[in-house]
Image (tube, rainbow, N blue to C red):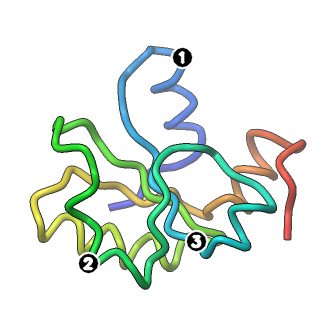
Amino acid sequence: MEITPDKIVGWINQKKPFHFLDVRRNEEREICSLGGFHIPLHELETRYHELPKDKLPLIVYCHHGVRSLYATQFLKSHGFDALSLRGGTDEWSTTIDPDLARY
C-alpha cells in the first residue's frame, strides 16, 4: 500500500509512467509540491472521478503519509492502482530533495 521515495526515483530513472496526487490542503501545496494532480483529502470522495482513467499508478502524497494512506485505501476501493508515498513530502525532502521546503 506504500511506496518509498527511493522506489519512486527508480521509477523516474526507468521512465516508468505514473501520476502524483497531492491530497494536502491548498495552503500546504503553496509551501511545496511534488507536482501532479491536486485534490484535498476532504474533497476526494466527491472529486475522485476527475482523476485519469488511464490505469497508470497513482502515487498519493501528503505531508507525513497518514492522509495519503487513507486516500490510497479509498482509491483502491474505487478501482485505482494507488500507492501512498511513505513519509510524504517530509521524507521526500530529507531523503531525495533537500531543496524542497519543509514545514
| Label 1 Cα crowd, 10 Å radius (few <14 / some 14-19 / many 20+) | few
Image depth: mark 1 or mark 2 in front: 2
The secondary structure type at the circle numbered 2 is: helix
Residue 98 percent across, percent down from the top left:
87, 44
Question: Which amino acid, mark 1?
Answer: Asn
Residue under numbered circle 1? 13
Q: CA distance from mark 3 to mark 1?
A: 26 Å
Q: In the picture provided, is 28 more to the left or to the right than 77?
A: right
Residue that appears at 81% across and 52% down: 94
Residue located beneath label 3 in the image: 24
In the picture provided, is 55 more to the left or to the right than 88?
Answer: left
Query: What crowding class fits label 2: few (fewer than 14 Cα within 10 Å), some (14-19), or many (20 or more)?
Result: few
Q: Nearer the viewer, residue 59 or 35?
A: 35
Under tag 1, what secondary structure?
A: helix
Per the image, the residue denoted by label 2 is 46
The answer to which image quadrant residue 54 occupies is top left
Looking at the rendered image, the disc whose residue lies closer to the viewer, 2 or 3, is 2
Locate the N terminus and report the quarter of the image it occupies: bottom left
Residue beneath the point at 51% across and 36% down: 8
Q: Secondary structure at mark 3?
A: loop
Assess whether mark 3 and mark 2 are in contact (beta carbons under 8 angstroms): no
Task: Quote the CA–CA distance across marks 1 and 2.
Answer: 34 Å
Disc 2 to disc 3, C-alpha distance: 15 Å
Q: Are marks 1 and 2 in contact (CB under 8 Å)?
A: no
Residue 71, position in %: x, y?
A: 35, 73
Closer to us: 44 or 17: 44
Residue at 86%, 55% (x, y): give it.
101
Nearest to the eye among marks 3 and 1: give it: 3
